Amino acid sequence: MIPAAIHTDTVYFAAGCFWCVEAVYTELEGVYSVESGYTGGKTYKPTYEEVCTGLTGHAEAVQIVYDPEKISFKTLLEVFWQTHDPTTLNRQGADAGTQYRSAIFFTNVAQQEQALFYKKQLDLSGAFAKPIVTEIQAFDGKFFPAENYHQNYFSQNPNQPYCTFVIRPKMEKFRKAFHGHLKKP
């Protein structure tokens, strides 16, 4: 629950399977909620099955509501760039298709400027062997929450094979790199 006096901001990130992205951002101090869903497409209220066809234009994404006084947008971007491969077009690992594209859907000018700046700096620095293909575009106001079984997937299904072999190793790497930003138990 977000206290009434707290100012929050919202951003939408797509970085492959939303199960992975949701698991990462849920653990960050200053993040109040993370919801898996679909954005960036043309179909109204798409289903998971429809999005998986690649025909709706949607990306699997997460809606992140955060307190900018507790966690900066810059830190959210650092996590974004370091927890997926932003150089692979429409793919993350074995997950392939436009629904798995790398994208930042910003909700204000400050987010847009920071995302574009950060992307440019990473490309100029040679941080990645290939150019970054992450889309950076304005959030169009249309986010469709994914079906209930997709919400909190990693915490609800820790022994499911995808969670064991894909998400858990990603989480271990993330927790080590961002231990100072994690919620206190």
Image: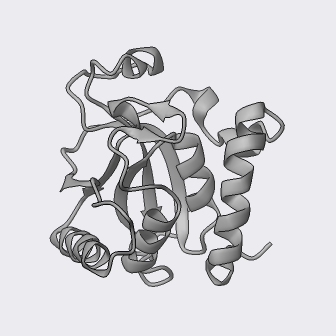
User: Is residue 21 shown left or right of residue 10?
Assistant: right
Looking at the image, which residue is at 27% across and 70% down? Answer: 119
Q: Where is residue 36 in the image (x, y as percent from the top left)?
A: 49, 41
- Residue 141 lies, with reference to residue 118, above or below; the image says above
Residue depicted at x 52% and y 52%: 34
**Left of 158 or right of it: where is 53?**
left
Q: Quadrant of residue 64?
A: bottom left
Q: Percent x, y for residue 19?
A: 58, 42
Q: In which quadrant will I find the N terminus?
A: bottom right
Residue at (45, 15) in percent of width and height = 49
Q: Quadrant of the C terminus?
A: bottom right
Query: Picture coordinates of residue 113 (x, y %)?
Result: 18, 74
Toward which corner of the image does residue 67 lie, by quadrant? bottom left
Q: Can residue 2 be seen in this view?
A: no
Q: Position of residue 9 (x, y in %)?
A: 35, 67
Mark yes or no: residue 115 visible: yes
Q: Nearer the viewer, residue 68 or 172?
A: 172
Quadrant for residue 27, please give it.
bottom right
